[in-house]
Image (tube, grey):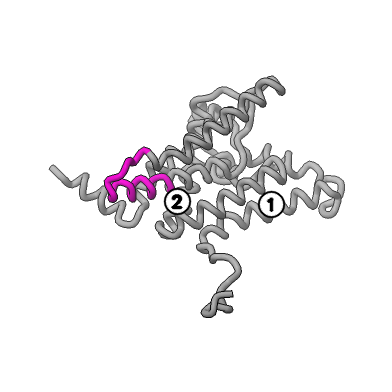
Amino acid sequence: MPLHADHNAPPINPLPPVVWLMVAPVVLIELAFTLGERGLAGGREAIGWRNAAITDWGFFDSVLDWMLANNRFPPEELARFVAYPFVHGSFTHALFAVVFLLALGKFVGEVFRAWAVLAVFLGASVVAALAYGLALDTPQPLFGALPGAYGLIGALTYILWARLGALRADRRRAFLLIGFLMGFQLVIGLIYFIFRGWADWGWFADLSGFAAGFALSFVVRPGGWQAVLARLRQP
């Protein structure tokens, strides 16, 4: 043991409060679903809580099509854009999302302010849903925090991209993580298609979330909005 060890130091590095703000709803909702599925809460009806939540709060491109076709935007339908990230299809799905949010939120939260981290997560989720609904024609609903988490990957990529630029290093290295993850998702998607006969379009939402997070970082980074205004004011 080091001679000058800090015995009052926390066992794990503290996380920014905004990270817990994003993770807590995912954990609490998944806890309710898991207890209900195991018959430990809610009675017999609790078995269907997860499917009902996906139906009520998941994002469907048919809902977006209906709103655009009728020029009507009911609040309960618009709420899907920010509600779907907190509903997951299984315990494993939620666990992956929580791990991503904890790790990425910590890194991004050490550079961005709390409101900026939340803006990237929710903004990427909204953009991902819009891209999913406008570009695809699929009955498969969109749900889960991964599109928002990929938005945080976009923010992390921006941070690495900016640092590499300051060091005059190859900025393309900042995109190695997203390249690896999308390659992995491509393999998983092919496996789903070969053995189950249907395509999982979640990767499209994830990639859209990444692009949105990277783009939003130019605005929400420290001093970013001032830089945007200064550029707009240039003749």
Residue in view at x 57 percent, y 32 percent: 185
Tell me the quadrant of the picture where the N terminus can be found. bottom right
Q: Dot 2 lies on which element? A: helix
The three-letter code of the residue at mark 1 reads Ile
Q: Residues within 10 Å of mark 2 (few under 14, many from 20)?
A: some
Q: Mark 2 = which residue?
A: 119
Q: Position of residue 135 (x, y in %)?
A: 49, 25
Task: Report whether 95 appears left or right of 22.
Answer: right
Q: Nearer the viewer, residue 53 or 100?
A: 100
Residue in view at x 31 percent, y 52 percent: 224
Magenta span contains residue 169: yes
Looking at the image, is 157 positioned above or below residue 69?
below
Tell me the quadrant of the picture where the C terminus can be found. top left
Q: Which stretch is magenta? A: 156-172
Q: Nearer the viewer, residue 224 or 168?
A: 168
Q: Position of residue 85 (x, y in %)?
A: 58, 45
Instruction: Residue lying at the far left in this picture: please name it.
Output: 235
Q: Mark 1 = which residue?
A: 29
The three-letter code of the residue at mark 2 reads Ala
Residue in view at x 18 percent, y 47 percent: 233
Q: Position of residue 133 (x, y in %)?
A: 53, 29
Q: Residues within 10 Å of mark 1 (few under 14, many from 20)?
A: some
